Image (cartoon, rainbow, N blue to C red):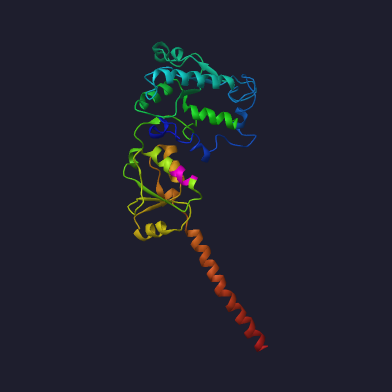
Amino acid sequence: SFFEIHFKNRSLPPRLIMAHIPVCDPSPDSPAAAMATTGGGGGVVFGGGGGGGSPPFRFVVPDDPLLHSDLNACDMAQFCAETSELIRQNGGIVVSYSQVASSHLLSEGLPPEKIDYFVLASSSYENFDSIAKLASQLNAALVSDFWIEHVIEQNCVGDPNDVRIHHTPLPAGGIPALANVKIAITAVKSRSVKDEIKAMASVAYPTMEVCRDDTFTHLIAGEPRGKRYEAATSRGDVHIVTPKWLEECLRRWERAPEEEFALAVQEEEEENENENENETAAPAAAEEKTAALAAA
């Protein structure tokens, strides 16, 4: 879920990546679960930064046109108003951007009160480095409106220092190390999964090619079967990986090591070998038993 080619038209399913990665530890005793307990905001998800009467989470939703590079002034105003209202309705506090982004505050250290999250629209940004620097100066996690929606839906915030696995604005242009990657897809569970993989690919690198021929460099496979799988194994120069490889590229925002996500076929082959050995051993054991009976 993050990319110029999709976000400008809002055509990418907003929970594409989040569907595979939980927002928080589901254990009721986990620290993340504690964050979802009642707090200063009246018992809703952003109401307490740790439970037990902790103060509500504090958000900045910047109304600066220089930051919202892909929104016009009218759309930016609407985004800021709707996102701020959603945060307030769920117990959070929205702090004025002008208050925290003034040169006085940033030159003399952090704002008087902690800022937890810096919120922008889900998109890619040419000026991402400047945005990330500003969020870092505020010691705030950089998140998107889609992340907020998903947190509200799940009623669990998770670790505010570990948002890279969640929806977040991203640099424009994709992951440079994936520039020459061409993918093919085979043996996945459903058409919707295949569509998700294609969408992730376009997020990772906007012009990443999904091949119909055999020129692919990476085969994303759900199972070790199919003509493309056979072609990839016979070529020997193709990375055969699971869909988790693309997810990890997005999480790290770099090319993840393919060997860590190689499609597991060895176990299946070993199982087949064991079955063959058992099938061979059974008749042999029967013959030995028959011979022993005859000798007796």
Rendered location of residue 34, percent (x, y): 62, 29
Between 179 and 139, which is closer to the camera in this rendering?
Answer: 179
Rendered location of residue 252, percent (x, y): 42, 38
**Which residue is rendered at x = 38% and y = 34% of the image?**
5
Rendered location of residue 148, percent (x, y): 52, 27
Question: Residue pushed farthest bottom?
Answer: 295
* 202 sits left or right of 282 in the view: left
Q: Is residue 92 magenta?
A: no
The prevailing secondary structure element of the residues shown in magenta is helix
Residue 39 location, quadrant: top right
Between 186 and 243, which is closer to the camera in this rendering?
Answer: 186
Rendered location of residue 46, percent (x, y): 58, 23
Q: Is residue 157 visible?
A: no
Residue 237 location, quadrant: bottom left
Q: Is residue 215 visible?
A: yes
The quadrant in which the N terminus is found is top left
**Which residue is rendered at x = 67% and y = 85% of the image?**
293
Q: Which residues are magenta?
A: 192-197
